[in-house]
Amino acid sequence: MITICTLIFVIAICFYQSITYKRMYRYVTSRLNESMSYYCPPAAVILPCKGLDPDFEKNLHKLVAQDYGCADSSQTPNFEIIFSVAGSDDLAYPVIEKVMNQYPSIKSKLVIAGIDNRRTQKLTNQLEALKQISPQAEVLVFVDSDVIARKDFLTRLITPLQDIEVGITTGYRFYLPSKFSLPALIRSLWNRLSAWELSSERFAFAWGGAMAIRRDIFDQAAVAEVWDRSADDDLTMTTAVKKLGLSVYFVPQCLVVSHGDASWSEVIEWTNRQLILTKVYYPALWFMGVIRAAVMAGWLIVVLVLAFQILALQVYKFLPVLFAALLLLLVELFFLFQAHGLWRKLLNQEAKADGSERIDFEQAYKRLLWQSAIIVPLAHVVLPLLTLYSLLTNRIRWRGINYELRSPHETVVV
């Protein structure tokens, strides 16, 4: 009886993962094959900066060199960029000035936002930048400084906004570690699992590293007012726009490779921040994650108890039950391989057609597959613990600053 119940549990998980994977596969395939008419309204790109991320200057060059609004090389790009930092002593400040001076034809500003303890520094930077955009800007684009953008990144991100039912368009990150590292691989796997929700009409969310919204929708949803005492930009915008009955549109072509190396302390801090922000600003998505973590924790406890019974107490009648439970790992490995091919198809568009950068990507991505397969059992221990820990606290740490999220409308520096 126990064996049958365990098999039913594994089959249910397999069925659920099959549905979610097929949903994502159909979504990505349809978006890649979708053709849209040319849409290029004046855009304001807002980039809040704090410190120097890996490849910071390289990413700025790729952003400034976007071909948005250029039918040919003689045309001036139809966008402006507002860079924003807390103060002139920020390490990013001189690098931004240097890049701006190298592209005098691009309309750009560098804003000093100052510090406001009522919200996170990123939001303070963004809100100050919003004050500097030109009246002609019809679309607002928010990006992070660790985004490595393809040449048509802005065009891809903005084009779907011509659909009046689309409230926000979004890209997403793909953490690619440069070497074997358990914490970095755990974060990469966790992030890839989260990406599956981007194809869900109910749970899709905007990612603050690359999101675009029409200016009139931004004002109608009162996003700036929501941000005023918040700790989060993307989930608050997601919920505000969804209240208007509009959708979040994931643009697969705007999936970007991000620097993936990290220590255990960095991964724990990062994961805790993602979970707490989701808990406060998108509770439906967080609650689903908690249920999933509780199921995985329950599975882990069952496996450990069965293993103890068999190895320590020599109760071998539990062997079939244990084998049935461990089938779940095979199911997860199967979908890991399936999804690996899907992500590779998207990320290939980011890599160069030839050259060392292409070779580096191919080598790193091949390593990622077998390395991720190795750490799947470890993920069953770490991810449920990290998720369930978010039940206990509303405190996060972000770029060296501690915040307490007392409510969706109150954030304080602690």
Image: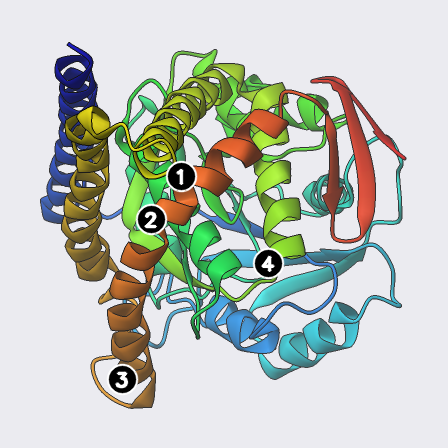
The vertical placement of 55 against 198, above or below, is below
Residue 225: percent from left, percent from top: 71, 22
Q: Secondary structure at mark 1?
A: helix
Q: Residue at x 27, y 27 (%)?
A: 315
Please name which of the two marks, 2 or 3, marks the residue nearer to the observer: 2
How far apart marks 3 and 1 lie (CA) works out to 32 Å
Residue 81 is marked as: 4
How far apart marks 2 and 3 lie (CA) works out to 26 Å
Q: Give the labeled residue for mark 3.
A: 359
Residue 240: percent from left, percent from top: 54, 18
Q: Residue at x 59, y 61 (%)?
A: 145
Residue 130 picture quarter: top right
Q: Residue at x 45, y 35 (%)?
A: 206
Asked if labels 2 and 4 touch by Cβ distance under 8 angstroms, the answer is no
The tag earlier along the polypeptide, 4 or 2, is: 4
Asked if labels 1 and 3 touch by Cβ distance under 8 angstroms, the answer is no
Asked if labels 2 and 1 touch by Cβ distance under 8 angstroms, the answer is yes
Residue 363 is marked as: none
